Amino acid sequence: MEIVDFLHYEFIRRALITGSFIALVCSLLGVLLVLRRFSLIGDGLAHVTFGSVAIGLLLKQHPVYVSIPIVMLSSLGILKLTEKARLYGDAAIGIVSSIGIAGGILIASIAGGFNVDLFSYLFGNILSISKAEVFTSMVLSLVVLLIISLFYKEHFSTTFDEEFAKVSGINTKKINSILVLLTGITVVLAMRVVGIMLTSALLILPAVTALQIARSFKNTMVISSIIAVSAVIIGIYISFAMNLPTGATIVITNFIFFITAFLYRNVF
Amino acid sequence: MSVNILSVEGLSFRYNSLEVLSNISFSINAGDYIGLVGPNGSGKTTLIRIILGLMKPNKGNISLFGVEPWKFKDCYRIGYLPQRTQFNPYFPAIVKEIVSSGLFSKRRFYKIPDKPEEAMIEEAMRLMDVLDIRNKLIGDLSGGQQQRVLVARAIVNEPELLILDEPTTALDPETRERFFHILQELNQNKKVTIILVTHDIASIGKYASRLLYLDKKIVFYGSFEDFCSSVDMGSYFGEFAQHLICHRHD
């Protein structure tokens, strides 16, 4: 199939625009999360999204709009558990994530009737995204990008050396809260691209690929962004041309980028 | 008249039921070079963290540039080198990015460094002899080079007070001596007040204007010469140990 034919379809154009914006945001946050060894928060919050989507469907409200505040609160919950309950990040993520899944299953079981809808969110379908969702995703992605840019120096300093950052006058608690809140918004948006099950891949894979070959922090951010957006474009094209599930194809494309970068670094 | 930079009075700190610092009192004036020494678990790092406003004491008063450390806002006046274990050595940042991050305390929002700031970054890298490796990743450097990069980050703001927590732990003796020499130049030529935490009394004794020996309480506070001639220190360490510390470099 020619690229021009591929772009002829409006649903493809919507998917490309939305997917690229969300991938860009995921790739930047992913670098910060991976370097802080907090990357599994994406997985944990995605599981919370399962529960919040169930609530949205139960209340007959759009699951994305219901999920954003719930997942943002959960992200803060993970942070507070880590800070206050003397838990390591992975244990805090495990608690919040399992509550999300259990809540989703209970709501689905009690309410009944929307299991098909709920399970469709597990695997995502970016090709069926609506105009309103494109708009929401673009606006929220731009907000997240703006906030990351405004606090770039604080994020760099806090990620590299939190104690030094505190002494430099940076409010690291605020920066950590901003990071997890932005991750919460992004995870909800990413759910439409690759589905709940694969959201963390969009956060982790571009970042770890960039870390294989990057030659500076700024360079890591740029490479991670290019890889993430390229994987979305290539993944959507391949999935459409070969009639494959889009989310899974995007993730596998990201993984191929990672293997290539890994081999480039270790073999050449 | 000397300007007081740090004043500590009757400071105590407990962690749960464990007493970490007891009734600590001392003061530091502008231009001093203090060697903060003591055995493991003696409370050196806790004292530094209290001075920096990262922890609050249970008792006592502390004043940094005339303000309680946790209310202190002029962070650019302080340069800090944390212990080596505080950062990820595989972090994908180059030397220049790390040194530049030391300027962040001076401003609230991100912007590309202007010409005077670029000059400050270059001067800090030149002083620490890391200018030639400015584009290298921190993880690709030796322990000594990494330490010099972190000191460059600490001094890029041209701070009045430089606090270094065990900066020489991973350095070989030759690099360690060179490192002490650079700090001495900063103290004498740039008039930077220094507090350096170390286990190595003999090495720091040659350079510091005063030693503060801590073991939960202040055991000694004075010059290296006074330390070496002190009968009390002879009894505390044993005369043979005191002799070894004081004459290691003879």
Image: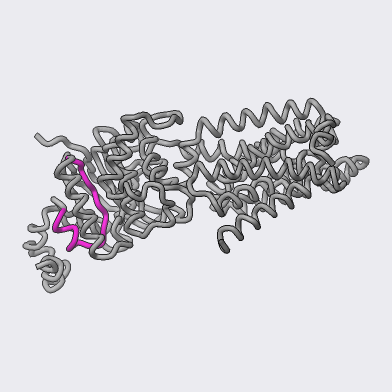
From the viewer's perspective, tell me whether residue A198 is left or right of residue B90. right
- The location of residue A256, given as percent across then percent down, is 69, 54
**Residue ID at (19%, 58%):** B204
Residue extending farthest to the bottom is B240
**Residue ID at (90%, 43%):** A116
Residues rendered magenta in the picture:
B191-207
Q: Nearer the viewer, residue B250 or A249?
A: A249
Q: Quick check: is B194 in the magenta stretch?
A: yes
**Residue ID at (75%, 41%):** A191
- Residue A155 in view, yes or no: yes
Residue B25, placed above or below residue B167 = above
Q: Quadrant of residue A124?
A: top right
What colouring style does the render use? one colour
Residue extending farthest to the right is A113
Q: Nearer the viewer, residue B236 or A173?
A: A173
- The location of residue B15, given as percent across then percent down, is 39, 53
From the viewer's perspective, tell me whether residue A181 is left or right of residue B15. right
Q: Quadrant of residue B60?
A: top left
Q: Quick check: is B106 in the magenta stretch?
A: no
Residue A56, placed above or below residue A109 = above
Q: Nearer the viewer, residue B155 or A12?
A: A12
